Amino acid sequence: MVDLEQGNPLSGVRVIDLTSNVAAPFGGAVLADLGADVIHVEGPNGDDCRRMSPVMGDSSAYFHVVNRNKSGIVLDIRVPEDREQLDELLADADVFLCNLRPGKLEKYGLDADALRARFPRLIHATLSAYGSQGHERDKPGYDAVLQARTGIASVTGMADGPPVRAGVSILDVGAGTWLALGVVAALFRRQQTGAGGAVATSLFETGANWVAYHVAANQASGQESGRHGSGHPAFSPYGIFATGNGEICIGIGGDAQFAKLCSLLGLDPLVTDPRFATNADRSRNSVVLKSELEAAFAASTAVDLAERLGQAGLPVDAVFKPEQLLVDAQAAANSVLLSIPVEGHGDLTVPGLPLTFDGVRPQIRTGSPAWAPRTTEH
């Protein structure tokens, strides 16, 4: 049994985290939450993430979220003395995280081949925008840019509107999670072989993985991917629906669920209507079906309707804002919310890792590193 009061699952693992911005630092935060000793290395000008809006103290909300549970150090890897200090840290480390572009890794001798030749047990883990190979490997890129490139933006938004970036930085968080998962797998392999390894992921590869259904559906149907708002091309009714006060999200996955929904709403004739008889029929006629359902929903509030339909065993919920998680009873029951101490500003309450070990969620033990700029120049 893992005793999280005494040590988290990765207790004893040391990680040197030479990353910046959001995606790769989030991977480091996952490892830190799991108990690893993570040292976040910043350049002399500080991590750009510190200055993202909104700011709390010497850092941004983003910085506090992706650098919690880490300690910090300032090094300029272009300066020989600082480069030597980084090597001293790596000599005693299990994992090296980095999101420098591949060409810069090679320039500074921080690529996997160079470091593993000196530190054979080191796990070298990198996150880039476009991947470690190919002619675009050194292109810069951020979450929204890669959502566009991999097609996520093109299938997000209303059918008659423009492509839209997802409202959450899904590629940053996703790629950071893949990075952490790769490190954990490499640590497990090292236990068996004694050798380190190279782990690499990217925003591009994460986005490509997440549009797998659309790529497969294009080949199966011959149809181009499109935007369906909050709906889905393969299911109906599915997505966001208006009520008398607020919106609900419904996910009906089969004919039996549709029949139950209609029964609860007093809309039994819809079940035998040839336009809605099967899921394929409903998908073809999703616009008119939505109109029929919203007319019935107009007499109820979103919260009341979601509760009534949910209690009947249907996958339905009201649409809430993210900050409503702060007072969500289900979040409290599952101990989802944790506190990040922010010096001089009290605590910042955020959701922790979506994992528990023996019923216990990994805790946020310390806040993000305070900014300590150099007082002397080399």
Image: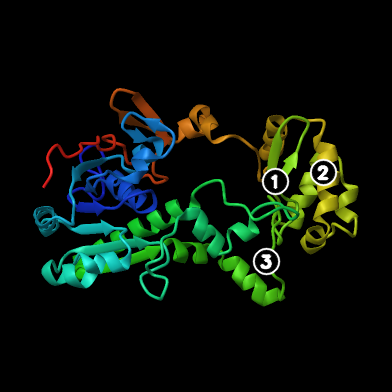
Answer above or below: position of 371 versus 357: above
Residue drawn 45% across the image and 55% down it: 142
Q: Can residue 251 be seen in the rendering of this structure? A: yes
Colour scheme? rainbow
* Dot 1 or dot 3, earlier in sequence: 3
Query: What amino acid is found at the position of numbered circle 1 in the picture?
Result: Ile
Within 10 angstroms of label 3, few (less than 14), some, or many (20 or more) residues? some
The image quadrant that residue 243 belongs to is top right
Percent of width and height locating residue 378: 11, 47
Callout 1 touching callout 2 (CB < 8 Å): yes
- Number of the label disc, if any, that sits on residue 293: 2
Disc 2 is placed on an element classified as helix
Task: Please name which of the two marks, 1 or 3, marks the residue nearer to the observer.
Answer: 3
Query: What amino acid is found at the position of numbered circle 2 in the picture?
Result: Leu
Q: Which residue is mark 1?
A: 250
Image side of residue 369 versus residue 203, left or right: left
Image side of residue 223 versus residue 23, left or right: right
Task: Please name which of the two marks, 3 or 2, marks the residue nearer to the observer.
Answer: 3
* Dot 1 or dot 2, earlier in sequence: 1
Image side of residue 2 versus residue 334, left or right: left
Q: CA distance from mark 1 to mark 3?
A: 22 Å
Q: Which residue is mark 3?
A: 225
